[in-house]
Amino acid sequence: MLPRPRPFATALFLLLTAAVSGDTVPVDWMMVAKIREEGLQHSQVMDFESYMTDVLGARLTLSKDMQRAQVWVEGTMKQIGLTNVVAEPFMDYGVTWDNEYVSLHMLTPDYTPMLGYPIAYTRGTDGRQVAEAVIVDLQVLGDLEKYRGTLRGKAVLVTPPVPIDMAALTSGMPRRTQAELDSLQRVVIAPARPAPPRTVRNPETLLAEEKLAFYEAEGVAVVVQCESGWLAAVRGYGRPGARADGWSRAGMLASPVVVAITPEHYNRMYRTLKRNIPVTIEFEVRNRIGEQTEQAMNVVGEIPGSDLKDQIVMIGAHFDTWQASPNASDNTSGVAVALEAARILKAVGAKPRRTIRVVLWGGEEQGLFGSRAYVRQHFGNPYDSTVGAKPGYEKLSVYFNQDYGPGQYQGIYLQGNEQARAMLAAWMAPFADFGMTVVSNQSVGSTDHVSFDEVGLPGFQFLQDRAPGGGGHTNLDFYDTIQRDDMMKNAVVMASYAYHAAMADTRVPRKTVR
Ligand SMILES: [Zn+2]
């Protein structure tokens, strides 16, 4: 623990740096030094990462696993010294779903254990079963007749054989090149996006949920699929149609058993069947399905502000994951960084003017549900007359998010908010030696800062390097591939950005929304 900074000295220093540099955006180099020392010499970020990945594991939104993990993270926030720690419920989400056991084997023509996981929100088996495998190629309505009455008790292989990505195997993960970083910086006018082609759904084409309903009606024993192009990787998400039925118990029980397996095991069975040689598999899946609809949670904790304490600076990451691994990169790494950033600020005795709020989202993987519900409830949306701006809308300064893997920050994306450039660039200056130098005008998506950006609030995602490992959304996303140095640097940067935003004379400017 470091001695607390003297606010008077800090204020004086801020005044001096501003006066000397003539810069309108001051940087508190003394505080940066303390944050760097704490975060680079006494880091706990990998301890957070290890506990979440090794002990807690996967955290599917609303699973029992997630509920247990939320209790842990609330306790950890309190231990760090955060106040107002609370799990805030959002929406009547659905029922809990947890995989508790899975066992898959090919028995003939040759025994081999197989690696796979159930797709979320599906039913389990009635004990251990053995079934003959068959290839099924359902595309259009007319295909149904071809298979009707032939699939009872079968293990159906429903996806085409999968090409393996050999480039990933032989050359690994390329880090960003300097040329790539330069171009991210230099492209200042967003490239025009062509209007998406008008698509009309062919009514003959079967939807994924229609195929599942057919397999269930036909009494298949298990649906086997593979959507992964990496050796040893299982990629499996949620059951098609689960969102439409509100993650309901009835929907889960009405689903066939569905497992995703690795491409090498899948392709082996597929090729063998193409030789007209029978393949039998043994399998058992136990999924625990909740009894009643429950609300999902975002977990919140704060470092209270002082003279501007009713204004808020937010940092965060999504706490939920898919189910096949501990998801060390996506997004346990972001959660570990946000927790460590908060810990660093408490450890150096930061006394922010604005309140710094850490939020760990639920429901991101299924469609940003947690952050959208939070923004709607706390800040509102002035561009939607059915919602309107809430009083909190003017109180938020900025939200910083991490969710592009565990790679180190090399810059930040402005989301087209040129008015925020001066601040975000100035706060980056102390981290040039980390390799963080790029301010990109570009807008990026697919994660929780979007929930802020889309209602006109400043929400930013850091520009991150690609990192090796990081099998996001697969069974291969473990602690061992996370780069410690990147994580430590990211926590330092996130802490420093949060601190500077909390101390600034003004809120982070908002972009003009038209
Ligand atoms: Zn993610």
Image (spheres, helix red, strand yellow):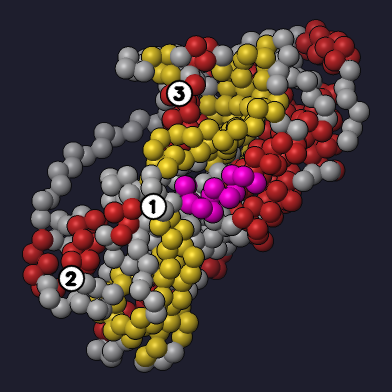
Instruction: State the residue at coordinates (73%, 50%).
Output: 46
Residue 97 in view (yes/no)? yes
- The image position of residue 172, as x and y in percent, is 57, 62
Whether label 2 touches label 1, CB < 8 Å: no
Instruction: State the residue at coordinates (32%, 44%).
Output: 246
| Residue type of the residue flagged with mark 2 | Glu
Residue 424 in view (yes/no)? no
How would you rate the neighbour count of disc 1 (Cα within 10 Å): few for under 14, some for 14-19, many for 20 or more?
few
Q: What element carries label 1?
A: loop
Q: Look at the image and give the residue range highlighted in magenta.
A: 60-72
Q: Is residue 218 left or right of residue 260?
A: left
Which residue in the structure is indicated by mark 1? 291
| Residue type of the residue flagged with mark 1 | Glu
How would you rate the neighbour count of disc 3 (Cα within 10 Å): few for under 14, some for 14-19, many for 20 or more?
some
Which disc number belongs to residue 377?
A: 3
Check the image and report above or below for 354 versus 299: above
Which residue in the structure is indicated by mark 2? 218
| Residue type of the residue flagged with mark 3 | Gln
Instruction: State the residue at coordinates (70%, 42%).
Output: 76
